[in-house]
Amino acid sequence: MIRRYKLKDYNFRLVLVLIVLTSIGVLLVGSADPSLQKKQFAGMILGLIVMVVVSLMDYSWILNFNWIMYGGNLFLLLLVILLGTDANGATRWISIGGFQFQPTELSKIIIILFFAKYFMDHEEDINTLRTLVKSAVLIAVPLAMILQQPDLKNTITIAIIFCILLYIAGLSYKIIGGALLIVIPLAVVFLFIVVQPDQKLIKSYQRNRIMAFLNSEDDEYSDAVNQQENSVMAIGSGQLTGKGLNNNEVASANKGNFVSENQTDFIFSVAGEELGFIGCVAILLLLLLIIFECIRTSLRAKDTAGKIICCGVASIVAVQGFINVAVVTKIMPNTGTPLPFVSYGLTSMVSLYIGMGLVLNVGLQRYRTYREVEKS
């Protein structure tokens, strides 16, 4: 349902930051792979159009269909398992009319919308065992389907986002403390198990990435760690101002193909090499501004659902942005997470813009409750 809103309430600061960051992404993708630049630009335009349309739709009305969205999300994830397209040993895409669509990216937005409504409806009993168990079961189903693809990185990312949503909904600090006392030892045990040669918890290539991170000096894992080491060298080679976009230096980690997937997961290495330290800082500041505007909007939301939506979308940008930069700079094991609004990927970009449209709509409705009371 489309509503009329006052133009002065529209968050043009957020829109401007999104346009600037995505434009930088289009330039970097074009430098990494010129054949993808037009597609990335088209994705940016489509994303902006979708964002504007969604921003004018009443998010409270959208939340009325939360169970339908939840079921639709499971259906899409099931289609991936049954009819998905295989690439690099993983089945994560659905081919529709010649285009590849990755449901997991849209799933993040759907999960945020679903739990925004669910947690608001259970605001009074959020800390009861019944509500927490039901919430855990509801998130476990899509997580298990995503893990089946296999897609461990997005499984972990969505699990982290879910925890953030639960915290924003009002989870007791006593429960959080108790959960940490259980989760931290389990994480240590999990890590101890997965480093064993005959473990069955994760795939062999996933174990190799962890082992390469823990034993980067070991010749056995040299091939696995080379990409990250080349990425660090590429970023360092850019120094303060970079070598310039579309540079043709033979030693370039970008043009020399020393860093694979540089148009997606390792786009930040292209930024470091061609835009230098200043360019990297600019990208990080733009991401930080997006997160700040989302959180700022959440503080003025008319209800708990709006607050959860804003913080949920902010958490996607924050978690994925942190993981991407940490991987590219070799602070974390290689996980293949795209940099929000910068990496190539139309599904990811459009999904993020849908999330931003929801944030803008929450901002447009920040005075609605006050105005309705004033009229009565």
Image (cartoon, helix red, strand yellow):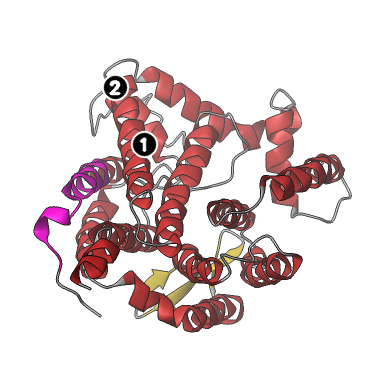
> Would you identify the image quadrant in which residue 210 lies?
top right
> Would you identify the image quadrant in which residue 177 lies?
top right
Q: Which mark is residue 180?
A: none
Q: Would you place residue 274 above or below residue 165 in this image?
A: above
Q: Which residue is mark 1?
A: 288
Instruction: Give the percent coordinates (x, y) of residue 37.
Output: 24, 51
Q: Which residue is mark 2?
A: 278
| Amino acid type at mark 1 | Leu
Instruction: Give the percent coordinates (x, y) of residue 339.
Output: 41, 44
Q: Residue at 41% across / 70% down in the picture?
A: 100
Magenta part mainly helix, strand or loop? Answer: helix
Number of the front mark, 2 or 1: 1
Q: Would you place residue 276 above or below residue 347 in this image?
A: above
| Amino acid type at mark 2 | Ile
Q: Nearer the viewer, residue 132 or 184?
A: 132
Q: Is residue 186 magenta?
A: no
Instruction: Give the percent coordinates (x, y) of residue 341.
Output: 33, 49
Q: Would you place residue 69 above or below residue 215 in this image?
A: below
Q: Residue at 53% across / 40% down in the picture?
A: 323
